[in-house]
Image: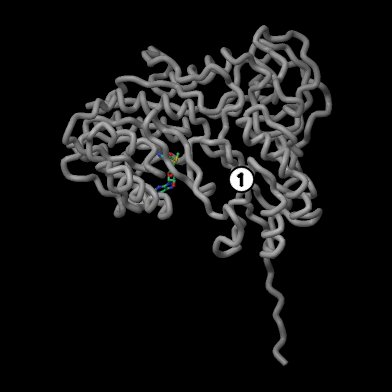
Amino acid sequence: MAKHRAINTFKPAKKAPAKVPSQLLDLQIESLADDGRGVARYNNKVVFVGGALPGEHVKAKISRSHKRFDEAELVEINTQSPDRVTPICAIYDQCGGCQLQHLDYQAQLNYKLARLSKLIDGGESPVFSPAIIQASATRYRHRARLAYANGELGFKAKSSHSIVGVEQCPLLEDAINTALAKSRDSLARYFGHKASGEVVFSADRDGRVGIRIQKDGFVDVKRSEQLAQNIAAPAFLHSVVGTKGPSWRGAGASLSYQVTDSLTLRYQPGDFTQVNTAINRQTIAQCIAWLAPEADELIADYFCGLGNFSLALAQSGVQVMGFDAGAGMIECANQQALEKSLPATYFCADLFDPDAITIPVGCRKVVLDPPRAGAKTLCEQLAACQAINCIVYISCGPASLARDLAILKQAGFKVDDAAMADMFPHTHHVESAVFLRR
Ligand SMILES: C[S@@+](CC[C@H](N)C(=O)[O-])C[C@H]1O[C@@H](n2cnc3c(N)ncnc32)[C@H](O)[C@@H]1O
């Protein structure tokens, strides 16, 4: 029998966890970080304090220590910021969905505007169009993705992977809160205590709410059909991932959302849609105003999704070509262009792959709306293509926007205008629209 020879392997010594000072620190909060936490300094090291606001003097306890920064829990506020307000949600302290509810709404807007201004021109001269905002900063989401685990249906907790049970959420449209209340018990029975998964609620323009379920592990078709019968209006079971074909009434039905006064788009709960329809409509109007479409022009829409921007542009008579990696959305966009007799054509393409990017001949104007990772490869190609002289960049990722703007500026583009669109009030997320020309 062959003998196994012992092999000497070198195992690096396990790193001892960094020591966390146990004493309470007295901290002066200087600013807000990009994730909405207060920033202070202690012994020349940055300390992030969740829930603390600039100008506040607080007592905090270090919870995690890292090489370059520490994280601390807020224990006491000694001097309170005049911008501090009572959060609108009873579970704000536990739920990880919102980060800024304790900050006055106007101060939230100022914080987001300052972040955008800093990344565009170092905060020097914010020559922006007015921020795109809406009258109410609540009940704005027409789509919500909740998690189910350990018998709880809700959102991920603040700084942990556990789930905080959510009965109602002030950021959701009324129809979704009603659907949540009416389907919660049926969903709990469906998942039971052991199963986990994801539940997406998507509201239709007429108030119906489609529920799409992704359950980990085995999916029982009979149980899914039973669930479909138990869910009461305005909610209906749209689909259970892993269950083939429509097997109950309403399964797979399309939903719709309003994009302009005269344009409604169909979508499926798994598709990308802008969650805040009011802000989306204003952002589209701003985009069209900047691009000033002229008859017979060709405009390219990169990361087009269902054609949110380009079908609206096509309504003004210009030709549009859209590109996105979502095959289902591209098919739907082409169908909708055909049904509405709009001059738009859509193509499936991976826009992170340099060989899959097409810049249509005759195209001078572009709108792009990439995911948070941005559009480095596309911007490099747009920068190199001298025919392109007008770009509207819609961004949900400030860091990638800064990187991509640098690529475009290097090639002679200048920021002509920009607007912060508050698509996600009470969260730290910054959506922006930037207009560039060369
Ligand atoms: C922020 S959404 C914008 C969608 C659309 N413009 C809208 O307003 O509804 C980003 C889009 O990028 C698409 N996407 C993500 N990764 C992609 C890739 N590698 N190539 C092409 N499209 C991609 C997604 O399918 C999604 O539709």
Quadrant holding the C terminus: top left
In front here: 357 or 275?
275
User: Measured along the vertical axis of the image, is residue 436 above or below residue 245?
Assistant: above
Instruction: From the top left corner, tell me how far across and down residue 247 is, in percent.
Output: 59, 62
User: Measured along the vertical axis of the image, is residue 73 above or below residue 310?
Assistant: above
Instruction: From the top left corner, tell me how far across and down residue 277 is, in percent.
Output: 49, 30
Q: Is residue 44 visible?
A: no
In front here: 205 or 322?
205
Residue at the right extreme?
A: 22
Q: Which residue is mark 1?
A: 200
Amino acid type, mark 1? Val
- Image point 75% across, 42% down: which residue? 17
Instruction: From the top left corner, tell me how far across and down residue 433 is, in percent.
Output: 39, 27
Quadrant holding the N terminus: bottom right
Q: 403 left or right of 321?
A: right
Q: Quadrant of residue 5?
A: bottom right
